[in-house]
Amino acid sequence: MASVEQAISSLNEIGTEPFNSESERLRLSNALLATLRRVQSPWDIACDHGYIELTTTAAIKALIDANVFTKWIEKGNKPLTAGDFAELTGVDATLLGKSNRLLRHIAAQHLITLVDENTYASTPWAVSLGTDTAIASVYGTFYHELMAPLVISLPSFLKETGFKNPDNFQDGNVQRVHGKGSTMYGYVAASSLRSKEFADVMNFHARGNISPWTEVYDTCQIVNGAKLDRPLVVDIGGSKGHDLEKFHQRHPDIPEGSLVLQDIPEMLEGVTAKPVISVCPYNFFTPQPIKGARVYYLHMVLHNWPDDKATEILKNTADAMEPGYSKMLIYEDVISMRELSVQATMADITMMALCSSAERSENDWRTLIGGVKGLRIAKTWYIPHAIGGIIEVERV
């Protein structure tokens, strides 16, 4: 067995060179987590969960609100003393100055780097918080108003219901927290700030937690043989259109009107149509108005709904598909029981708490899609060791 010094030396070399792929990085990240758990004592793990994660998130949110990360970027992102931060932001010197209580706590988490007494250097994570509103939104209303109350309530809800698997969208944990008749989506839409930050987080999730769909699926299959009198891709529940932008970047020469963004009006607020991308307010529990498109694309839509509601969405989409021509592409986490991923299992518990739904295994997807008359899975597209897969569905 290597000595502690040898092990630390080897660990310090990790991350100094770029990874060959996102899936390679994720494999190593999960392996390091497994190693950490073997090293930690039971108290270390409990302390992480009961104290460190909560207090670190609180400190980060306070620093975001104090504009620490944006001011740091304006100052050239160079190492600064705690006193420098207090002067830049106008925050109480006891909080950020000599005592530097918030800064030292996130430095202890290796989120920023202590390079000298009371002097801190930035990291890629800190730079992102100062330049990317999407990652900053993770720590905003998405965490404090949406995620935290519902996740905290989940154990009590499960106990009250006799530990039955939640599968009723209208009588779940969200109704326990926000009242009868409420929904997670209604709660988000009721606040313009929550709506904005929720869209930001979905954008960040699409960029940071999952491979771009155009790298997973051979999108040339969409363009080749396409009929030019109808849309190429209809993005159902597509938020602000991030995935359509990726398709357009991959295929810049497609005709005007080739791409259609659909979502409820509240989520489309502030979205401007473009020559290639049209905007179509749409509730996917109603008949699909666009018939015979080449592709109907659903990214992280069905995992929000238990099987009965997901089946309604699939039926409405299937009814609009042209047999032998149209495809449905479903980009979702696909739970593996052989190679567990904390990113996927985290999403599963999140969906339980927020929507009485779940992430699905490949067998779950086959059962769900096979239960809709006329639909069959043609192929499931994966990048090895990456999160999620694209399920290609045909109408027969």
Image (cartoon, helix red, strand yellow):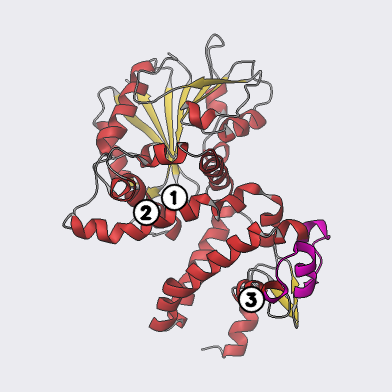
Image: 37 above or below 306: below
Q: Secondary structure at mark 2?
A: helix
SS label for mark 3: helix
Q: Is residue 246 left or right of residue 331?
A: right
Residue underneath mark 2: 150
Looking at numbered disc 3 in the image, what kind of residue is underneath it? Answer: Arg
Rendering coords of residue 396 (x, y %): 32, 20
Q: Which residues are magenta?
A: 72-94
Type of amino acid under label 2: Leu
- Residue 357 seen in the figure: no
Q: Which residue is mark 1?
A: 146
Q: Is residue 357 left or right of residue 382?
A: left
**How many angstroms separate mark 3 from mark 2 (CA)?**
29 Å
The disc, 1 or 3, on the residue closer to the chain's N-terminal end is 3
Residue at the location (51% across, 61% down)?
27
Disc 1 and disc 2 in contact, CB within 8 angstroms: yes
